Image (cartoon, helix red, strand yellow):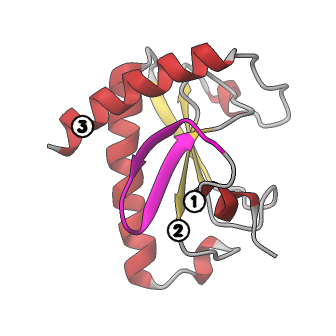
Amino acid sequence: MPSVFTKIIKGEIPCHKIAETDLFLAFLDIRPLAAGHTLVIPKEEVDYIFDLDDYLLSSLMLFAKKVSKAVEAAVPCKRIGLAVVGLEVPHVHIHLVPIENVQDMNFSRPPIKLSSDEFGVIAEKIRAKFLVVDA
């Protein structure tokens, strides 16, 4: 059974897309810990990050690095926190979270509330920075 992320990749479920390549997709998390909280996924449906082949794993991290630079440039923060939990959705995903302190990475906190318009504005700001970073 396809994961929710596979449905997003196929366009069956909408997302606030940040960046996309043939292999990867980055989009805003719908349950963000902070404005700009972005998920980076491979398009190949693999459940566990350490089951990715070496090329895909290293390429995923390099793509996440480019995305994180764009998030950091678009969203005021001290740094971008990175987490791979891997239990919520059976599809590899990296959380990139704008943070001010370590407590900002606490996934047991309730997500912040953003309107669809707010998600759209944030996504556009990050996309604009990604195009600069990726150039």
Which residue is disc 1 drawn over?
9
**Mark 3 sits on what residue?**
131
Three-letter code, disc 1: Ile
* Side of 42 relative to 85 (left or right): left
Mark 1 and mark 3: span between their CA atoms?
20 Å
Front residue of 104/39: it is 39
Q: Secondary structure at mark 3?
A: helix
Closer to the N terminus: mark 2 or mark 1? Answer: 1
Nearer to the camera, 15 or 30 = 15
Question: Is 18 in the magenta?
Answer: yes
Secondary structure state at the residue bearing disc 1: helix
Q: Are marks 2 and 1 in contact (CB under 8 Å)?
A: yes
Mark 1 surroundings within 10 Å by alpha-carbon count, few (fewer than 14), some (14 through 19), many (20 or more): many
Q: Where, by quadrant of the figure, is residue 126 drawn?
A: top left
Is residue 55 positioned above or below 33 on the image?
A: below
Q: Nearer the viewer, residue 7 or 55?
A: 7
